[in-house]
Image (spheres, rainbow, N blue to C red):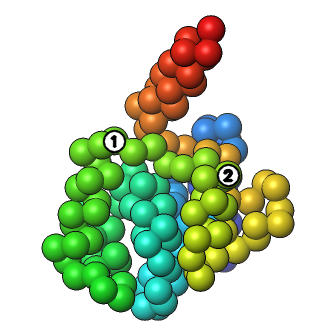
Amino acid sequence: MATKTQSKNNTLDRRDENRGQSNKLEDSPMMAHLLKALKGGKDVGHYGRLVFAMVARHFMPEDEVVELLANQPEQDEARARAMLQQVISRDYNPPRRERILEWQAQQDFAICPNADDPRACNVYSDLRFPESVYENVNEFYEEQAESQA
């Protein structure tokens, strides 16, 4: 019983230190949904795989991400690794909730299981990414503001 309480306190401490955000991928309901589907061999669609790769690469070893993606229909290890390498080489930031919903509308699998909840599927609220991700996002918005000025 002490272990369960200790584990719960560690999760709370981890979230408190990071402004309510977690360093554990499974603490994002959307990412837990994608992980469960991927582990169960369910087809998450192209955009589900892309979202997973864009987010999971910050929380899991590359080989684990590739292994999960390679078990998808019309995928193998080479294709999964190529997709992940493209995401890494282009340094794609995790997508905003709005982008996830746009992509979800183009496929059968529901990437965001609670799309009606405006707080759902915002990985930036749920997870704590490396500082470089936030720097890239800020740089993007600064460039957008400059181009509109």
The residue located at (62%, 8%) in the rendering is 149
The residue located at (70%, 74%) in the rendering is 113
User: Outermost residue toward the front?
Assistant: 148
Q: Are marks 2 and 1 in contact (CB under 8 Å)?
A: no
Tell me residue 62's x, y (percent).
Answer: 26, 61
* Three-letter code, disc 1: Asp
* Three-letter code, disc 2: Glu
Instruction: Please tell me how crowded label 2 is: few (under 14), some (14-19), or many (20+) other residues with Cα within 10 Å.
Output: few
Q: Visible in this render: residue 59?
A: no
Real-space Cα distance between discs 2 and 1? 19 Å
Discs 2/1, front: 2
Tell me residue 50's x, y (percent).
Answer: 42, 63
Tell me residue 42's x, y (percent).
Answer: 48, 89
Q: Residue 98 bears which disc, if any? A: 2
**Comes first in the chain, label 2 or label 1:** 1
Instruction: Please tell me how crowded label 1 is: few (under 14), some (14-19), or many (20+) other residues with Cα within 10 Å.
Output: few
Frontmost residue, 29 versus 82: 82
User: Outermost residue toward the left?
Assistant: 78
Frontmost residue, 62 versus 107: 107
Q: Residue 26 bears which disc, if any? A: none
Q: Is residue 67 left or right of residue 112?
A: left
Secondary structure of the residue carrying tag 1 is loop
Rendered position, 133 above or below 29? above
Rendered position, 60 above or below 77? above
- Report which residue position mark 1 lands on: 91
Q: In the rendered image, which quarter is residue 131 located in?
A: top left
Tell me residue 142's x, y (percent).
Answer: 55, 17
Frontmost residue, 97 versus 13: 97
The residue located at (48%, 61%) in the rendering is 51
